[in-house]
Amino acid sequence: MNFAYLSILVFSPLLGIIALLFVPKAKESVIKTVGFLATLPALVLSLMAYFQYRSGSSLERLDEMVNWIQFGNPNRLGELFSIKYELGVDGFSLIMLVLTAILSTLAAIASMYIKKEWKGYFMLFLLLEVGMLGVFAAENLILFFIFFEITLIPTFFLIGKWGYFEKEKAAFSFLIYNGLGSAVLLIVIMVLFARTGTSNIEALTSILAADSSSLVLSEGGKMGLLIAMLIAFGVKLPIFPLHSWMVRVHVQASPSVVMLHAGILLKIGAYGIIRFGMGIFPEQFQDLAVLIAVLGVVNLLYGAFLALVQTDFKMVLAYSSISHMGIVLIGLGALNEAGIQGAIFQVVSHGLIAALLFFLVGVFYERLQTSNIPNLGGLAKGMPITAGFLLAGAMASLGMPGMSGFVSEFMAFLGLFREMPVLAAVGALGIILTAVYLLRAVLGITYGKAHREFAGITDLRKAEWVPALVLLGIIVLIGVYPSVLTEPLTSTLETIMLGIGG
Amino acid sequence: MSSVPLSAYLALGLILFCIGLYGALTKRNIIIVLISIELMLNAANINLVAFSKFGVMPSITGQIFALFVMAVAAAEVAVGVAILIALYRNRNTVNIDEVNTLKH
Amino acid sequence: MENAWIIPLFPLLSFLFLIFFGKRLKEASAYIGILLSLASFVYSLLVLFERFTSPTHKAESVWLTIGDVQLTAGFEVNQLNALMLVIVSLVSFLVHTYSKGYMHGDERFHVYYAYLGLFTFAMLGLVLSPNLLQTYIFWELVGLGSFLLIGFYFYKEEAKKAAKKAFIMTRIGDVGLLIGMILLFWQVGSFEYDEIFAAVEAGAVSSTMITLTAILIFIGAVGKSGQFPLHTWLPDAMEGPTPVSALIHAATMVAAGVYLVASLFPLFTASETALMTVAIIGAFTAIFAASIGLVQKDIKRVLAYSTVSQLGYMMLALGSAGYVAGVFHLMTHAFFKALLFLAAGSVIHAVHTQDIEKMGGLWKKLRVTGPLFLIGTLAISGVPLFSGFFSKDEILIAAWAHGNTVLFWLAVIAAFFTAFYMFRLFFMVFSGESRSDMKHVKESPSVMTVPMMVLAILAVVAGYVNTPWFGTFLGDWLTEGNPALGHGHIEGPSWIMIVATVVSLLGIFLAWLIYSKRSLSRDWLGASTLYTILYNKYYIDELYELTVLKVTKGLSLILRFIETFIVEGIVKGVSGAVSGLGHLGSRFQSGQIQRYGAVAFVGLAILIVVFAVTGGYLK
């Protein structure tokens, strides 16, 4: 593979930022086009990498490594305490890269609803994309953390400037929660770095795996670090009771930002737990498995029950995200192949489904200026195609077979039923509740009598077809032919299972 | 001539310093505060000069430093009084406890 | 038979094509739907004939890999599957044809046909499934098809509610099925029917586990087949277009529960408790729904409760180890109930009302529909020589032979009820004089009547494939080479047949006395409490409203309370504490320069003292 393939992939949106610098502020359509085009290189490159991997080429050829920062005396410490710029991917992170690239492109299309200051918006948007891509390509914790922080700042401004009525409040609560989360994460990373002298994920894994006599870190220390890490990523995921910021963001941010936020940013939490929590501390993770599964069930039911009584469709979706992230935790708590694979599937699947649903929220909001369910109704008459997509999205979300939601839900529960049948049976109630709240909301919007005349309302425009159709297409593809995900995941899963000795 | 001991100079410096400190911390009028600060600086000057004569390594350096201090003190007073006049023109007061706008 | 997988693809093609291009085709969409469903039917017939001579065919490939476990997808053609294929594709084809007349003029005509295609695809896929997982997948998809079609008139508030209710009620059952299926998987290590049966037979699964999983799976069947206590969605589902009721809520999807129990029959027979549960639920539903059917006033609702009741019959048959009886009744019921619904649709099409009290005297006006409806009514009432008679008889014999005496008599009473309310319906609609302004009543076009005639013929003759008089071909064929399914024919005392005949004739006679000859008061129940209870369907809906819904809602509100006051409260507390600390700190920032100086001086003094005491070093 070519030199610096991943670097080009990760930093390609920067080109767009540079190009945007030369575009006058007021040229709306030019800015939007440039912003959209700038997401394409990453999409093409990530898809190429995916297909090459599928056709058998090794991912290690993509690895990159450059010396970067060195602490202390290199002659004495050698490789220790040096931070390298290293990028690399495995099957899981490659999938996340592809997902990020796809959702970024689609969200760029959905950014047509942005009404002001397009230039600043797209610059931040592209910077956010760099951060997200970097998070999944980083091979060491410090680089990961840097990219992680890069996602934070653009998101803060994107929420705070281009959102709805209470956008500032939402942005601040986003920043505070996530800031605290990353502070905790930084502590974890620094402790690990100070103790082991490296922050490379693979090296850390092998050092800690060989450390059976607790020379590097005491048992309690490892457990403490893992819990801290769970809290840090738990804010992101979010795990009950750390979720209230996320509801606010989902409701207040503009649809295109929420597409990325619900689609990718929340998934960084899951990615972190799987890759670092489970990867670096497999033994401790096993001790916490029951707790995680319980948290998962709590998330699932808590989100579902709350979604049941919301009147704002965005709130319903926000709580539904919490509920669905519960399934990720359920899968992880099961700690067997089915569960973990289900969790990863859920990460991808929910990313797609949430993006689709929030995009449709944007479509409705653009036309009706409301997402309050009692104010809507009967929209299937005026907007049959949008209504159809909405129903399809809801079906995917509630786990209709033939769509990605089912595969992930099924595997997560399959996994948990093996380990903790009673808990899983309680969690299965969530499946019913999901159907109840989603149908209540979706039918409330599209079925029934129209409460007011929506005269002259237009159905999906051409540009709006693209995100809806692409997302639904991928959702169905994964649902019908899950091998598109299982095959790249095989080696990742094997590594994880090896770690937890399963 | 050399009957005055070092301790006397130092005691004088200490007394002057304490008077200055007391004035700087308690007086409301900024002019008095400025004068008190001058007192403290001069207390330091006395110490410098005394040590230049009776120190471990007597030399001219101490006296030169005292000259420096005087120059700096003069500059400081000039700036201080300028601020004071500006303040008086704007707020019609020279009381230090009424000058707390930086707090807000 | 190797290409049987192609059968469900025809309707899928129809769905995809119509959903994308149907809008331009308008009513020509019907031809595509009809043609493709006909293709399925013809192919199914070929497969059935081939199956008569050749053994079961099964083909699978890997669908999903989980670690070392490989889950497969494929298809299987065994006797039951082949039979179901033909039933489903035939009824679907007929309904496709019929709908062309019935739905004429609807602006979402093509959507209707697309949905029909989707449903038929799912249903055919369901009956071809060789393993539980695939069954579950299509099981959910038929639910989706049903949901879409019930809610077809989406602008009607009732249709929306009915669709939602149908989806959620069946979903409750589905979760039972899902749990049962997964538990079974971890016991057996496979979703394949064959391997499950082999493991059960080999005793690899503990008997408690068998009972538990069988009952959980049965809950799925209860949801789908509208058995008590999850039956309430089925009558409400009549909000959909009538041909849909015929296809989904009479002949095919609701029978999927019965089909599921039948295809897992060896699992159920391994546990006496599970069998007993099936039988009791079945028998209870049969009489329970029949009693409600006695007093309903909506033509489709009467038929809906009759469906629930008949499905209960089938469950009773399976629960009494009468595999053949259950499947046999499933088949005959599919024909005569589809016929009844289509005929009812034809009536509704003609008079534009569903209230039977506003009908009457239609016999003379609907010269084709009337006799067809009568044939269906005779068949379902169990009048000798019609198909329902033979299959019902089989069920009664199975129940008796299995020793379920109480259930047997319940079933006999239910048969009496059935004959009574069906003829009540028939007489109220067709006999007497026109009870309101019905001048413009016209017979339906032939595109609607021809499918009904086909079904009518089948409703008469379908019974003869399995009779105690001419031979039990169906039973022998179904159980051939598979002793786990029981015998092809169960011997029973001959008085049962006589009892069944007498009971049904008695019911018809009574209905005739009351509703046609009127020698007895039509308000035989009057305004009694019993009538009110029956008319309000035992207040089951209200009961659910008061318990399940209220509890769920209450729980949600409690959690919302927790969310707003505790979770957010903690957040507020933390942020309050931080800003409180800030305020406290800002108190020191008085802006009094002299105070700062004093503090600095005191601090310095303290430091000096400390240094003096400790000799210059802090420990």
Image (tube, rainbow, N blue to C red):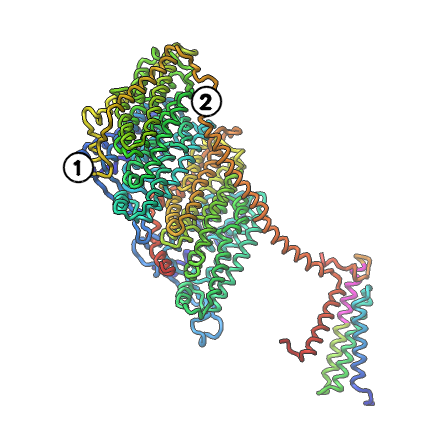
In the displayed structure image, the side of residue C391 where residue A297 appears, left or right: right
Residue where numbered disc 2 is placed:
C530
Chain letter for the residue marked with disc 2 in the picture: C
Query: Can you say which quadrant of the picture contains the N terminus of chain C?
Result: top left
In magenta, the rendered stretch is: B74-88
Towards the viewer: A245 or C410? C410
Rendering coords of residue C564 (x, y %)? 58, 45
User: What amino acid type is highlighted by mark number 2?
Assistant: Leu
Residue furthest to the left in view is C53
Q: Quadrant of residue C290?
A: top left
Q: Is residue A311 left or right of residue A341?
A: right
In screen coordinates, is C374 left or right of C175? Answer: left
Image quadrant in which you'd find residue C598: bottom right
Q: Position of residue C77 (x, y in %)?
A: 23, 37
> Disc number at residue A466?
none
Badge 2 marks a residue whose secondary structure is: helix
Alpha-carbon span between mark 2 and mark 1: 55 Å
Q: Nearer the viewer, residue B66 or A57?
A: A57
Q: Amino acid at mark 1?
A: Ser
How many numbered discs?
A: 2
**Position in image of residue A218 (x %, y %):** 47, 67
Few, some or many C-alpha atoms within 10 Å of disc 1 (few <14, some 14-19, many ≥20)? few
Percent x, y of residue A375? 54, 33
Of marks 2 and 1, the one in the foreground: 2
- Chain identifier of the residue bearing label 1 in the image: C
**Residue A118 inside the magenta-drawn segment:** no
Residue occupying image coordinates x 53% and y 54%: A178
Residue denoted by label 1: C54
Of residues A64 and A353, the one drawn nearer to the viewer in this rendering: A353
Main secondary-structure element of the magenta-colored stretch? helix
User: Magenta span has B76?
Assistant: yes
In the image, what residue occupies the spot 49% across and 68% down? A194
